[in-house]
Image (spheres, helix red, strand yellow):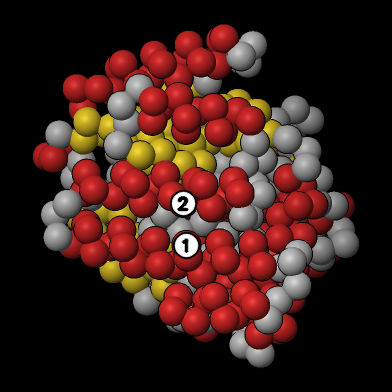
Amino acid sequence: MTGGFRAVYGRDPEGVWAAPGRVNLIGEHTDYNDGFVMPLALPQTCRVEASRRDDGVLRLHSSAAAGGVTEVRLDGLSPQGATGDRGGWAAYPAGVVWALREAGLQVGGADLHFESSVPTGAGLSSSAALEVATAVALDDLYGLGLRATRVAELCRRAENDFVGVPCGIMDQMASACCTAGHALYLDTRDLTQRQVPFDLAAQGLRLLVVDTRVKHALGDGAYAERRAGCEAGAAALGVRTLREVPIEELPAALDRLDARLRPLVRHVVTENERVAAAIRLLDAGETHAIGPVLSAGHASLRDDFGVSCAELDLAVDSANAAGALGARMTGGGFGGSAIVLVRAEAADEVSKAVDHAFAAAGHRAPRIFEAVPGAGAHRVRAS
């Protein structure tokens, strides 16, 4: 990979770092409500080659982006600056540098070259992988001594306050903290976490990702609208976040809300309960039994939270009709990807059924691949 860095900057990098994308097994749109999530890291990663600079300049280059090198002075970094225009990929790594410096960390200039195998626009957290890769590279280069959880917190601040995306912390925590062979059971309120063994092959199972290859523009503002609706629902119920609404009190809580807020609140509270159900099944070694939990989660995201779309529904419905144990959309919604839990011997048949359904509907062929729980962010090699 160092050929890319050398071609751009005319020297060798000091090292190479990688951070993965993720799929979320269960727990969607709960992270910004202080709820529970269970993501796993993908083998697909964003890699960054990096070297320090001593002139206060940050230079950014991506093999996937047109336009050459983005260059900015560190003392000019701000959410309103040229790389904080909320429209370009360079705002994400620039935002990380800004967040590190805003936290009082001694970060100087750098040359960074990125290459990523995480599909963009697929709901697989390519932006979080970009952020976390940047943070771990600078952490090593400048000896910051950051814990993985702190890396995630700073990367979320970069995305919230510099880029302007009101995301929760799940994506950054998954990219920074996941371990190979495990799903990450995360309480997003206090960031306590547990690595849950998730060896599907040993149980004769596979988890497929169906990248629909579509992203509907509605998702740009609708994510913020859903978050605002959740906050309004919590305020109406007199709680800080919807995490504080117990499942047994949900019917009474819904009676106190106007019709616009009820489905949003119902999704978040029941989704937290689905995460609890999934972790009980995994702890009991009954991984196959989480299939109906996944499908119930999709129904809630489709009907209550309103973030699915025709392509995601088709992926889920056709997979389940072909014998999948369960399926649901993953990520923010309005396009992106679905996950499908299948018995290993049925994986090919289910994949073909989804392909055929998309072709019959006149949709572009989806990209289908297996999700094998990978490692979180790490240094790939030194110079």
In the picture, which quadrant includes the C terminus?
top left
Q: On the image, numbered disc 1 is attached to which residue?
A: 271
Q: Residue furthest bottom?
A: 238
Q: In front here: 101 or 356?
A: 356
Q: In front here: 31 or 275?
A: 275
Provide the secondary structure element on which disc 2 rests.
helix
Q: Amino acid at mark 2?
A: Gly
Left-right relation of 51 to 369: right
How far apart are the two marked residues, 2 and 1, measured between alpha carbons?
Answer: 7 Å
Provide the secondary structure element on which disc 1 rests.
helix
Q: Position of residue 232 (x, y in %)?
A: 74, 76
Left-right relation of 275 to 105: left
Q: Amino acid at mark 1?
A: Glu
Q: Is residue 282 visible?
A: yes
Q: Position of residue 31 (x, y in %)?
A: 53, 66
Q: Position of residue 139 (x, y in %)?
A: 49, 64
Q: On the image, numbered disc 2 is attached to which residue?
A: 297
What residue sits 72% from the left and 83% below the top? 236
What residue sits 15% from the left and 34% below the top? 204
